[in-house]
Amino acid sequence: MHPSIVRPTPAPAAPAAAPATARRAQHRAPGRGLPARRAPRAVELDDTGAAEVLTSVLAGLRAVPDVPHVDLRTRLRDLAHDLVARLDLPGTLLVAKAGAVAAVVFTAVLLLWLAAAGRLG
């Protein structure tokens, strides 16, 4: 026989009996069929008072606002986005730099004045 030909190996033998400690397959209940659909009852519009009921239902539906309810988190997020959009970042940086320079100049002038007056130590 040629060495590249492989002989099929026999399948392992099935165990004769399962040990007593082995779990058995769980029983599954047969599937339930879908319940029969109930035919909808016919609505009789010629009943006494049906027109008034329908009119009040339609009036109630018209009274519902078309604007969706917006929760607090969404309103705060939208407010933050609007504030960021309105913020003038270059102008704010200019004012912040000018304030920092003014504070440094004021401190230097104050220190020179105190040194000239002999109060610095």
Image: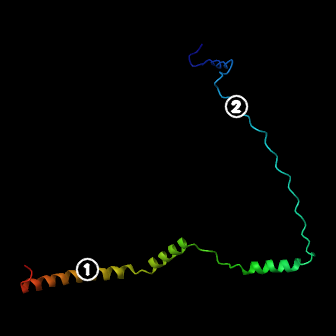
Is 93 or 22 nearer to us in this picture?
A: 22
Give the left or right position of residue 101, taking residue 45 as reference.
left
Query: Label 1: which residue?
Result: 100
Give the residue displayed 86% in from the left and 80% down from the top.
Answer: 52
Horizontal side, residue 18 vs residue 32: left or right: left
> Which quadrant would residue 17 be assigned to in this image?
top right
User: Quadrant of residue 42 in the image?
Assistant: bottom right
Q: Residue at position x 91%, y 74% from top?
A: 45
Task: Tell me the residue at 80%/44% (across/down).
Answer: 32
Local crowd size for mark 1, using a 10 Å CA cut-off: few (<14), some (14–19), many (≥20): few
Numbered disc 1: secondary structure: helix
Horizontal arrangement in the rendering, residue 37 relative to residue 66 (left or right): right
Q: Amino acid at mark 1?
A: Ala
In the structure shown, which secondary structural element does the residue marked by tag 2 occupy? loop
Residue at left 35%, top 82%? Answer: 91
Q: Amino acid at mark 2?
A: Ala
Which circle marks residue 25 in the picture? 2
